[in-house]
Amino acid sequence: MKIYIGADHNGYNLRTSLIKSLGRAGYDVVDEGDYKLDPNDDYPVFAQKVVIDVLKSEDPDPRGILICGSGQGMCMVANRFKGIRAAMIYDVESARSSRNDDNANIACLPAKLLKNDKDNSIIMAWLDTPFANAARFVRRINEMDNLG
C-alpha cells in the first residue's frame, strides 16, 4: 500500500514522526511536505498534493494522511475532490469506522489534539481496517460520488 502524507506547520512534527514509524512498518511512504517548518505555509497546498497523488496512483489501495492543527481544514480541502473520502480521525474508533463504513482513503489528523504516543495506534487502526463492502455502504459511497 502506498501512503502519501502531507502537513502544514502545525502538523510538521507529527508528519515527521509518522513517516519514520510507517517506514519501519514497511509501508511505501511518499512525503509531500512541508519539508521545512514554515509558520506561514498554507494547508490547502499540501492537501491538494496528497489528493492528486492518491487519485493518480496506480496502487490498488492508495491512502493519504493529512495533518494540520485541527485536521478540519485539510479535511475540507480534500473532500472537494470527487473520489476522495477524507475523514477526521482522532481515536481508534473513528479510524476504524471511517474505513469499515465509508472506505475513507484519506485520514485527516488534528495535530493539536494528538499526542505522539497514540498517533501510531490510530493510524495503524486506520490502515489495518478493511472496507466492509456491505451493500448499504457501497450504495452510500456511490451516492456521495454522484452529488453535484
Image (cartoon, rainbow, N blue to C red):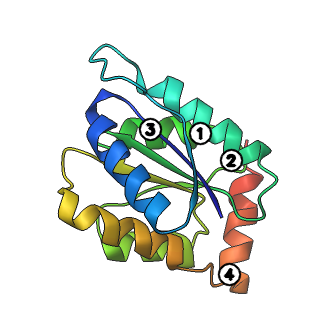
Task: Determine the CA span between mark 3 and mark 4.
Answer: 27 Å
* Residue position for label 4: 136
Q: Is residue 97 above or below residue 59?
A: below
- Lower sequence index among marks 4 and 2: 2
Would you say the residues marked 4 and 2 are in contact, meaning their CB atoms lie under 8 Å apart?
no
Residue with the most extreme right position: 58
User: Residue at image x 57%, y 43%?
Assistant: 79
Whether residue 135 sits left or right of residue 27 in the image: it is right
For label 3, the SS is helix
Residue labelled with disc 1: 50
Between the residue at mark 4 and the residue at mark 2, the CA separation in whole angstroms equals: 25 Å
> How many residues crowd mark 4 within 10 Å: few (<14), some (14–19), many (20+)?
few
Amino acid, disc 4: Arg
Mark 3 vs mark 2, CA separation in Å = 14 Å
Residue 34: percent from the left, percent from the top?
Answer: 43, 27
Amino acid type of disc 2?
Val
Residue located beneath label 2 in the image: 54
Q: SS for tag 2?
A: helix
- Badge 1: residue crowd in 10 Å (few <14, some 14–19, many ≥20): many
**Residue 87 placed where, x, y %?**
47, 56
